[in-house]
Image (cartoon, rainbow, N blue to C red):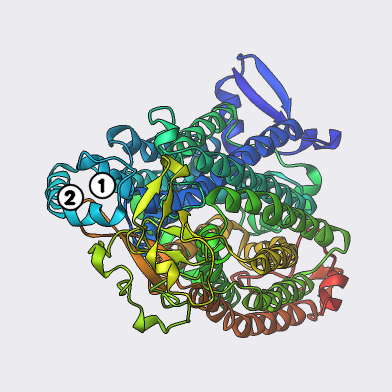
Amino acid sequence: MTVETKPCNANDSDQAAEPDQLLNDEGNKNAPVKKTSSCTGLKVFLAALSFSYFSKAFSGTIMKSSITQIERRFDLTSSTAGFVDGSFEMGNLLVIAFVSYFGAKLHRPKVIAVGCFTMALGSFLSAMPHFFMGYYKYETASHTAASANLTSSINPCSLHQDVNGTVLEVSQSGCEKEPASYMWIYILLGNMLRGIGETPITPLGISYLDDFAQEENVPVYVACLHTVAMMGPMFGFLLGSLCAKLYVDVGFVDPGSITITPQDSRWVGAWWLGFLIGGATNFLCAIPFCFLPKSLKKPERANKDKTSHGLLENTGVVRNKLSPEKTKPRKWSVMLKDFYNSLKKVLGNRMYFTCLCYSLLQFSGFIGFVTYKPKYMEQQYGQSTSKSNFLIGMTSLPPVGVGIFLGGLIMKKYKMGIIAATKFSFIMSFLSYAISFLHFFVGCDNNVVAGMTVSYEGIPIPYHNNSLLSECNSHCKCASNMWDPVCGANGITYVSACLAGCNSSVGHGKNTVFHNCRCLEIKSSWAGNNSATLGQCPKSDDCSTKFIYYIAIQVIGGFCYALGATPSYMIMFRCVQPELKALAVGLFTLTMRMLAGIPAPVYFGAAIDKTCLKWGSTSCGKRGACRFYDSNANRYVFLGLGAILRGPSYLVGIIFYILIKKHFQNKNSRPLENGKEDAGVNKEDNCKIKERLPGSSDAENESSI
């Protein structure tokens, strides 16, 4: 059965059909024909593409929301966890350029479907390590006691004195038999596979819309896509919040035996559950694309207005649609040569190249910030992973989605030319950058930890002078590499009950209370009881107030930045030749993945690792994940690195604005002959006179300064 698409307007019935469609009709004259409206086909494609945008953002956010859990579960440093997160961009990098160029010549909806199925496979692979690993074992004195056939109500000091040899033997035995040391590689490979599958969605989907939609509607469609895509991260972070509340081995471990809470830096949630749900979503979003046509017929108005159609007419392609040469398959050598020439044209465009550099610096800071934002909220404000993910999903992302959508509507309502859009996008981005500096003033001070941030007397000490051993715990011979914090009644956190000098304990699991802690007596101003409870002491009330300010700054800054997102995207899309749009978008994505998406999480993670004060230890006795950070250093490093990356981008942005303004003002000031544009305009220019943002008029392009 042949599917013939019909335009939205009735007057379009006399318009020429596409070459492939006409040739197909000649060979199938007697076949029944099913007529469908191109409007309907476009709406179905838009709905399917929106769902795929949601799905890829949803599964990508699950990875972001789980990065801290993965870091703790596999005892990784932040830089290694960043490398795992960057593997998505590595997969994207492998195929993005070829998919963007050669994919545009194939059946684009079916290529997108294959990509969605691949994303689903990658998500399922990422969850697999959980099912091949043993139960999660975190650092705690109760585990040590169990391994030494002791009870949890013993003297913490005597525990370390009597069983050090036994613990060492158990650790070495566990290390030799530990099969999970490199299980994180499966997460890396699954994330890379998901990156490969995500590749065709944006370049092929956007180019398909731009080819078959009316030009003035494209910004609204793009804004709708990005708005729906913002729902993906919102639901992804909410799902991440739910999974982080559940213990990693939920259903297989007695909850009463767990001595840690979700606020503890050793807590690991059910990170694997999110990947399974994300994989199922990716699988479902692939199905609609399997039934969509390769092409749609353009509306009459779009055919008249689109620069791409005019360019085809000038080159004689439209007049020779049925030429025999068009029906012959092209050789790979010819296609590769064409690819090289096209790539040379795109990179030779000064405006496009400047826009690329500006976006690269912006994305580097943005990706690093988004990757470790939940971790920053945990370490800076004492929030649990679950609450951090929940707040990001509910407060930070909705304003961004609204801002993106309003940005597209503003472009359409005011019919922004490319100059006005550039100016608007730059102002909004810079305003967001200025607001972000307020984050430096709403940070919390370090937690009060004896031997690390303060002495056992409660006096602040420099970072390099910290010492966990003191006269009050010297008789205990405590293990200094263990992190099992207790909160003293004096408000000071101690690295373990042993290092607090506690001599007895009462209770079981989370309700364990330690008594007769000698180190609490050292603080001269303390006259209360000498007991301690499991877990770190909570942050101050002042820190809770600052956290509210932090959330407010995030909402305002994110909204301002999002307002200029759609104009910024369309600017990059419009200053290349129409037939190079798919390649331009693909090359843009390639550059962001290779130079921002891959390295940014790694060097952000390496910088964060430098602020770690206390590292955990693995069953092999090697260094594990960080348990405690210097809050002040962490704030300045994390926020400062992002500010340093984004700052120079605005100097590049000014150069880009000058180039845009100069180019388009010169183009529009050329004389007209007989009511038509000067025929002497060089056809090889990357930005044509008529190449303006959708909905803009010639007068607007002249006056939009």
Q: Quadrant of residue 281?
A: top right
**x then y, percent, for residue 693:** 75, 63
Circle 1 residue: 144
Circle 2 residue: 167
Q: Quadrant of residue 452?
A: bottom left
Three-letter amino acid code at the position of disc 1: Thr
641 and 537: which is toward the camera: 537
**x then y, percent, for residue 37:** 75, 29
Q: For the N terminus, which image quadrant?
A: top right
Give SS at disc 1: helix
Query: What's the distance in space between the residues labelled 2 and 1, CA to CA?
Result: 7 Å
- Residue 432: mark: none
Q: Quadrant of residue 322?
A: top right
63 and 690: which is toward the camera: 63
Describe residue 79's horizontal placement relative to residue 52 as left or right: left
* Marks 2 and 1 close (CB-CB < 8 Å): yes
Give SS at disc 2: helix
Name the residue: 73% across, 62% down: 555
441 and 80: which is toward the camera: 441
